[in-house]
Amino acid sequence: MTIYCDESGGLNTGAMTFAAVMISPEAAAAVHARFRAVTGLRGELKGSRISLTERAYLLELFDRAGGRAWVAVAKREKLVPPADGKPPTDLALYAALLDLAVSSWLPETGGVCTDVVIDDGRYDPLILGRVRATIQAGLAGWGRASLADSRRSDGVQIADVIANSLFNIKIGSPRAHRIGVIIEPLVASRAIRIAELTHLP
C-alpha cells in the first residue's frame, strides 16, 4: 500500500489540514479514471474546484475502493503559543501535521506500507527535501518517502480533495455543512479518521 499526502489551508486562513491517504496505486488510478470519465473533468483534480456532488462521488469511489485516510488538522485559535512567543510558520505547522498524519498510520501498517508520496508543490524543493528526509527516518526500514508532482499523481490528487474537505469544515466555510454530511459516513466507519494538533513539537 502507498500513503499519499497533501495539505490544505494555512495560518492566514485560520486552519491547516493534512491528509495521509492509504490506497494502492492501482486503486487510486482506477478511482481517478472513473471520476474523470463520469464527470468529464479536465485538468488537475482539486478539492477547491469541484462541486459538492462531484466531491461526494469521488469520496464514494474512494470508500468503495477500500481507501482510508488519517487527516491531521490544526486551527490557529487552538494552537498553544510556542514557548518563545513567536507565531509558528506555515512550514513548521505543515511539517508537524505531516508527521502526525503519517505517524498515525505507522502502527497499523504491519510493514505493508511501501511508499509515502508527498506533494512537492507547496514549498521549495530543498525545504521539502528536508521534510522528506525526516519522514524517511521515521519510516526506518518500512518504506520509502518521495516527492511527487500532484498533477502526475492520482493518489495525491485524491488526498487534496480529502484535505480540502476537512479544511472547509474547520474554517466553517459556506460549504462546510454539506461537506460534513458528505464525509460523515466515512468518519463513522473510520475510513477517514481525524487527529487534532494543538501544539508544535
Image (tube, rainbow, N blue to C red):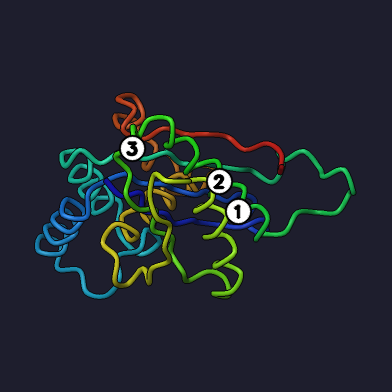
Q: Is residue 26 left or right of residue 184?
A: left
The amino acid marked with disc number 2 is Asp
> Does the residue at mark 1 contact the one at mark 2 (Cβ under 8 Å)?
yes
Alpha-carbon span between mark 3 and mark 1: 23 Å
Q: Residue at x 39, y 55 (%)?
A: 144
Q: Residue at x 61, y 69 (%)?
A: 127
Mark 3 or mark 1, earlier in chain: 1
Report the residue marked by disc 2.
99
The C terminus lies in quadrant:
top right
Residue type at the position of mark 1: Ala
Label 1 crowd (10 A; few <14 / some 14-19 / many >=20): many
For numbered disc 1, what is the local secondary structure? helix
Marks 2 and 3, the one that precedes in the sequence:
2
**Furthest residue to the right?**
84
Which residue occupies the extreme top position in the image? 188
Residue found at x 29% / y 25%: 189
Q: How many marks?
A: 3
187 sits to left or right of 139: left
The x, y position of residue 64, in whole percent, is 16, 39
**Label 2 element class:** helix
**Mark 3 surroundings: few (<14), some (14-19) or many (≥20) residues within 10 A:** few
User: Residue at label 1?
Assistant: 95
Residue identifier under label 3 = 111
Residue 31 falls left or right of residue 81: left
Rendering coords of residue 179 (x, y %): 37, 42
Helix, strand or loop at mark 3: loop
The residue carrying pointer 2 sits among few (fewer than 14), some (14 to 19) or many (20 or more) residues within 10 Å by Cα, namely: some
